[in-house]
Image (cartoon, grey):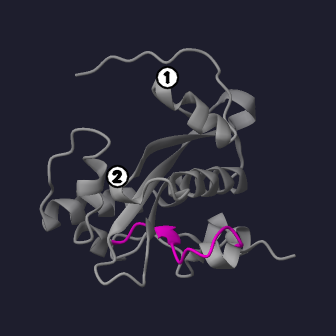
Amino acid sequence: MRSPEKEDLPSPGRWECPHSQTKMASTSPESAAAAGETNDPIHIRRLELVDHERGFVALLSQLSACPDLTASEFAERFAELAAQGDDHVILVAEDPSAPERRVLATGCLFVERKFLRGGGKVGHVEDVVVDAAARGRGLGLRIVRRLVEIARDAGCYKVILDCTPELRAYYAKCGFVEKGVQMAVYF
């Protein structure tokens, strides 16, 4: 049987995102119904410039301090990230049938290129958040699974993330195992 999640994503080599684009996305979003996950019409796709107006930054503020960005500031950061191509992927979940088409969930993957393991690559999952009103629908799980799939397809030898202790069980459901201790210096 066809795997829509995998086949609907273009191969990593085709995800070129020059500054002039308004999408960091594949043009064929995955739908939950097509993937056989639920009857939910949610689409998972790459971040687009229009997502500034659809509440992307406000959604991030549910995760951590995130001052609002003007449309111009958002566009500038979007262009910087899009220029990184497949090394920086931001996915969003939306319900295209909803009148406002708000961003309901998001997650990010960035690829670190290493000298270790023969010049291998490591995927880092970051900034996973689901809107408080949309929780319990499996959106975070779907975002994380897609990010892991993208990392695997990009040739990463592992995918890592940091989380708070209370989210250990959640990320275990996503296939992650506890490995080591995360430490940080904040500025």
Residue 8 is one of the magenta-drawn residues: no
What residue does disc 1 label?
A: 165
What residue do we see at 64% from left, 72% from top? 9
Residue shown at 55% from the left, 77% from the top: 29
Who is closer to the viewer here, 133 or 52?
133
Residue 131, picture quadrant: bottom left
Asked whether residue 41 is drawn in magenta, I would say yes
**Quarter of the N terminus within the rendering:** bottom right
Image position, residue 26 (x, y; %): 54, 75
Q: Is residue 4 above or below residue 147?
A: below
What label sits on residue 132 in the rendered view? 2
Which one is nearer the viewer's eye here, 36 or 17? 36
Where residue 34 is drawn, which disc sits there?
A: none
For label 1, the crowd category at 10 Å Cα-Cα, with few meaning under 14, some 14 to 19 and many 20 or more, is few
Which residue is at a point 64% across and 23% down the rendered structure image?
178
Position in image of residue 177 (x %, y %): 68, 28
Could you tell me which secondary element the residue under label 1 belongs to?
Answer: helix
Q: Which residues are magenta?
A: 36-48
Can see residue 94?
yes
Residue type, label 2: Ala
